[in-house]
Image (spheres, helix red, strand yellow):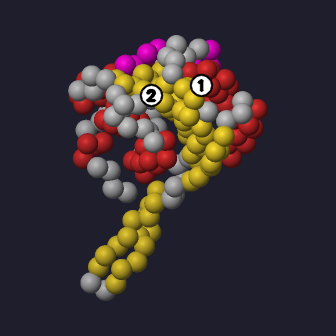
Amino acid sequence: MFIPQHYRRLKRGPQVILPKDIGSILAYSGINKDSVCVDAGTGSGWLAISLARVAKKVVSYDNRDDFIKIAKKNKENEMCENLTIKRGDVTKKITEKNVDIVTLDIPDSHKALKNAHKSLKEGGCVVGYLPHMEQVKAFVETLQKLKFRQIVTLENIERDILVREQGVRPSTKGVWHTAYLVFAFK
């Protein structure tokens, strides 16, 4: 698996969202230099930092001090002035309003969708990063109840390709399942 140099500089603690999924989040959500983002489940901060490289402002929530410490160090090392890391539980409250995107990488993320809906501006995107199908089902059913639209679930699978003199073929390694991504718009 190829990890770009700018990610190799970042310290890892908890599991991270990999570049293959970050790329889809950036592409399918439509964020840009004017976007305001809320990220929940900061972890090591890989997604929050990636969002901050593109967007105007990012606020990232986590409720674990050990993860926040790692993410703040990564933020400092990457000089992301437009990234704020907060201690908080988005299933209880999201203080930011009129945001362009809310990303949810937390257990029981469907429980945060009501607050995400309140936080998003019309046309804003919510993204769930969900390791299990049962989570996808609960997430999508909650999105439907909240009248989100354009609900799409996908999975990215990445394979390394060996290029050798004797022939080109897929490698026996790759990044298969990491999580399902669910996108929906308010």
Q: Amino acid at mark 1?
A: Ala
How crowded pointer 2 is (Cα within 10 Å; few <14, some 14-19, many 20+) is rated as: many
- Residue 179 appears anywhere in the view: yes
Q: Amino acid at mark 2?
A: Cys
Give the residue displayed 58% in from the left and 42% down from the top: 183
Residue displayed at 32% across by 50% down? 3
Q: Which residues are magenta?
A: 84-92
Tell me where residue 76 appears, x and y as whole percent: 25, 24
84 lies left or right of 132: left
Q: Quadrant of the C terminus?
A: top right
153 shown above or below 57: below
Left-right relation of 22 to 75: right
The answer for how far apart the CA atoms under marks 1 and 2 are is: 11 Å
- Disc sitting over residue 37 in the figure: 2
Circle 1 packing at 10 Å, graded few (<14), some (14-19), many (20+), is: many
Q: At which x and y percent is residue 160? A: 39, 65
